[in-house]
Amino acid sequence: LYNSLFHKLENLHTRDALLKMPYEICYKYCMLCKNTSFPEYSKTINEVINYIHSHLEEPLSLAQIAEHFHKNASTLSASFSQNTGTSLSNYIQRVKIEKACEYFKSTTLSVSEVALAVGFQDFAYFSRIFKKHTGCAPKKYRDQLVSD
């Protein structure tokens, strides 16, 4: 995590990116603390959860995570579902959308910038997944925050 954050700090190019770094560092630290305390999950699943939270800005997939942990994708998927009660892809989507909502609440990033910040390269896909998890489009969500 340290190396990942250090590399990110070295490559900051915008004021907004710099302003969100302290928040991101604190968030990742808190998530690591929180996620290591799921005694009902296996060690591997705790590590997968920590990995997901530490790499939210990247495109994450079952295949990529399984490869990272040197696990069979089907076995990892079944184990994750059995431990958490949700699929790995649904968990990743939910966590990324929760993070996107936090960005909308705490930054002035545009909807497309938020999509990229949580690892979605395809804006239309981000919008679809956001609406699936929140019940409204990302722009409408942001506009509601501004009007409140």
Image: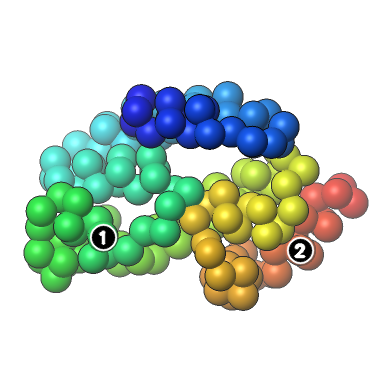
Q: Nearer the viewer, mark 1 or mark 2?
A: 1
Q: Using the image as rendered, state which of residue 129 and residue 79 is in the foreground.
A: 129
Report the amino acid beneath label 2: Lys
Count numbered badges in the picture: 2
Q: Is residue 58 above or below residue 140?
A: above
Secondary structure of the residue carrying numbered label 2: helix
**Residue corresponding to mark 1:** 64
Q: Is residue 79 visible?
A: no
Q: Quadrant of residue 87?
A: bottom left
Q: Is residue 125 visible?
A: yes
Graded by Cα atoms within 10 Å as few (under 14), some (14 to 19) or many (20 or more), the crowding at tag 1 reads few
Image spot of residue 27 (x, y percent) = 49, 31
Report the amino acid beneath label 1: Gln
Q: Is residue 70 above or below residue 47?
A: below
Instruction: Judge from the rendering whether residue 12 lies leftward or rightward of residue 69; answer left or right.
Output: right
Query: By what rule are the colours in the image chosen?
Result: rainbow
Residue 84's disc is none
Give the residue drawn at x 62%, y 69%: 123
Extreme residue toward the right, this view: 147
Q: Decide: marks 1, 2 in contact (CB < 8 A)? A: no
Secondary structure of the residue carrying numbered label 1: helix
**Residue corresponding to mark 2:** 139
User: Which badge, 1 or 2, is on the more N-terminal residue?
Assistant: 1
Give the residue drawn at x 72%, y 40%: 107
- State the CA–CA distance, disc 1 to disc 2: 30 Å
Instruction: Judge from the rendering whether residue 58 lies leftward or rightward of residue 114; answer left or right.
Output: left
Image spot of residue 126 (x, y percent) = 57, 67
Quarter of the figure that contains the N terminus: top left
Q: Using the image as rendered, state which of residue 74 and residue 80 is in the foreground.
A: 74
Image spot of residue 112 (x, y percent) = 68, 60
Give the residue drawn at x 18%, y 59%: 66
